[in-house]
Amino acid sequence: MDEKKFKEVIQFAIQRESESVDFYNQASQVAKFSGTKELFLDFAKQEEGHRKLLQGLDMDKVVKARIESIPDLKISDYMIDSELKSDSSYAEILRLAMKREEQSVKLYTALKEPITDPDLKKLFTFLVGEESKHKYQLEKIYDDEILR
């Protein structure tokens, strides 16, 4: 794979992860209960971990990475997008977070579609997997705590 193209993709993904860190930190400030605040701070830490992982990523690691299948509960598929407000409820924040992760999964999936380079395709598959993990975690929490 072209080294320049690889670096462009990684920089794009790092920017997306940075935006997610900011979102989850904001969500923790809007959250009304300490357990909820900690949940969103934990997601911010996970996104920061993804950002650091991407900063240290080289193509050899991507080629050797094991891609795992992540379940999709599809809960966010039936929700409309909204924005984080100072008075957003826990359920609203979860819905927004799920939609953000869903959009990231769709974005990386769409970017991967036309690619013929197998290494670059695997890089996008890796990114889809990372975002899918968060989407699943959020949908599971929403299913267990809000929809029950």
Image (cartoon, helix red, strand yellow):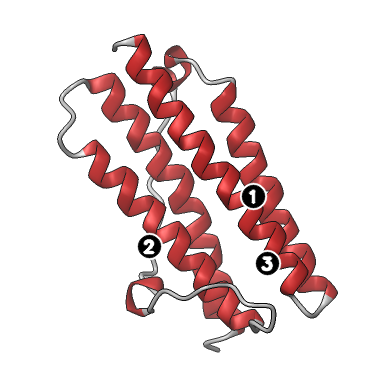
User: Is residue 75 at all visible to an observer of this figure?
Assistant: yes
Of callouts 1 and 2, the N-terminal one: 1
Q: Residue at x 84, y 73 (%)?
A: 34
Instruction: Where is residue 15? Give x, y as percent.
Output: 52, 38
Image quarter of residue 123:
top left
Disc assigned to residue 27 = 3
Callout in the foreground (1, 2): 1
Instruction: Where is residue 120? Give x, y as percent.
Output: 29, 24
Binning the other alpha carbons within 10 Å of mark 1 as few (below 14), some (14 to 19) or many (20 upward) gives: many
Residue receiving disc 1:
21
Binning the other alpha carbons within 10 Å of mark 2 as few (below 14), some (14 to 19) or many (20 upward) gives: some
Q: Secondary structure at mark 1?
A: helix
- Is 25 situated left or right of 120 in this image? right
Image quarter of residue 25:
bottom right
Residue receiving disc 2:
72
Q: For the residue marked with disc 3, what is the amino acid?
A: Ala
Q: Secondary structure at mark 3?
A: helix
